[in-house]
Amino acid sequence: MEALQRLYPIGIQTFSEIREKNYLYIDKTEYVYRMTYFAKYVFLSRPRRFGKSLLTSTLHSYFSGRKDLFQGLAMERLEKEWIEYPVLHFDMSMAKHVDQERLERLLDFMLSDYERTFGLDTTAGDANLRLTRLIKCAYEKTGKKVVVLIDEYDAPLLDVVHEKENLGVLRNIMRNFYSPLKACDPYLKYVFLTGITKFSQLSIFSELNNIKNISMDEPYAAICGITEDEMLTQMKEDMERLAAKLNISPEEVLLKLKGNYDGYHFTYPSPDIYNPFSLLNAFADGKFGSYWFGSGTPTYLIKMLEKFGVEPSEVGGKTAAVEDFDAPTETMSSITPLLYQSGYITIKGYDSELGLYTLDIPNKEVRVGLMRSLLPYYVSTPTEKTNTMVAYLSRDIRNDDMDSALRRLQTFLFTIPYCDNTRYEGHYQQMFYIIFSLLGSFVDVEVRTPRGRVDVVLRTKTTLYVMELKLDKTAGEAMEQINLKNYPERFALCGLPVVKVAINFDSERCTIGEWKLQTIDKW
């Protein structure tokens, strides 16, 4: 008889449901136990779809005294008392894309629900006064201190971080709502908040200065997400099933999972962290899909990239001190903090002598998904048509047929609507960067050599392409520059044949005008 199919908690963020229905659960309860003893007010920042809500729900079950849900987990051997506390759990993810009126209405709804639970009259009034009354009432009626859990505290504000006026209005509402958390300290057992942006960044906890921020604390590096060790131990059978389905070895499965979904670090040193949402979807579907981006690319990110004038090739490859990528949103002078907290770049290394972190795009899924989101700003065409072009282009490049690839691109660009900014060379450079990134190959722009900078370098498994781009000139002039500055010399030791690619773009036709190719087999 065939074994029962493993149940993966895709989109399920309620701890009790996962445990009662025997869904896969990666045991994080030792972190939960630890974080409830060393501080009373705790804050955790992680990107979306990283398990913040499930962690908050786990805390809810723990403080509700649900010992039955923790059988077989680390918490079962750690906790001895199992006291039931009154829990006020506010999920602010319901407050996305709201204006002032809708946000106030949602807070009223949340408070009214708890007021009825504790036998209070539901009356309109200031949210902070109602929350204060609610905390005191819960304490008096139960004789136990109150636990307050606030999940995604910054959700109402993320979509308006680029709108100064709306941000101020909504921020004041939220600051007012959260303000009792300090005044009610004598009645509180524990306060936990999650979000994407750091609490200091939206200036809504100015009064609550006693929060312990564990977001970059090494002991909690793996509190959200799935480590490779957890996957190899708690998901070993899942990997074997996926390998059998795809007819590849478990080792190959691990390499593909690692390339697509691994690579996150929220402190240094840190184990490699896999995106849990993407990883579980890959096991459930039996394929390596793009899941994190499929769940929605935040509009605020695209708008902020535009606001700061960040080119696609500039998203990764950054070096920064911690205060640079942890700066307040209102005062940040670059988009780096938002990219880091949103999960589009992550920590890749640390120079302890200089105190500098290396930040880069975590993995293939994020790189490809981000580039797909940015491509419409460079190529105005229906998504299906673009995807088809990229697929055929990928085959051309895999076959080392750059001539066919450029001919395909020439035809494609000629048939799409006119794009803005096509009269400067950088537009085409960034367009190439995006398109080649979608192929999953290594691509870089403005690569330094002893005699200058190469416009685009593309490396496949079999070939390295050195590209010089010109606008309204000739391919001959582009090739002449490659030869004059001897760009290929920089890559003589790469172990691959080098192809010189000279391209001229025609700004009137908004496409490739002509090109020349020349292969160097021997040095």
Image (cartoon, helix red, strand yellow):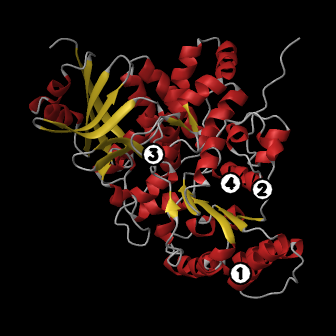
Relative to residue 415, is residue 156 drawn left or right? right
Q: Earlier in the sequence, mark 1 or mark 2?
A: 2
Q: Earlier in the sequence, mark 4 or mark 1?
A: 4
Whole-angstrom CA distance, mark 3 to mark 4, is 20 Å
Disc 3 marks which amino acid?
Glu
Q: Which mark is residue 56?
A: 4
Q: Nearer the viewer, mark 2 or mark 4?
A: 2
Q: Which mark is residue 484?
A: none
Instruction: Kindly identify the residue that appears in the image at 76 percent across and 82 percent down.
Output: 133
The local secondary structure at tag 3 comes to helix
Q: Earlier in the sequence, mark 2 or mark 4?
A: 4
Whole-angstrom CA distance, mark 1 to mark 2, is 23 Å
Instruction: For label 3, count other residues whose C-alpha is less than 10 Å away and answer few (under 14), some (14-19) or many (20+).
Output: some
Q: Earlier in the sequence, mark 3 or mark 4?
A: 4
Instruction: For label 1, count other residues whose C-alpha is less than 10 Å away and answer few (under 14), some (14-19) or many (20+).
Output: some
Disc 2 marks which amino acid?
Ile
State whether residue 433 is above or below residue 92.
Answer: above
- Report the quarter where the C terminus lies: top left
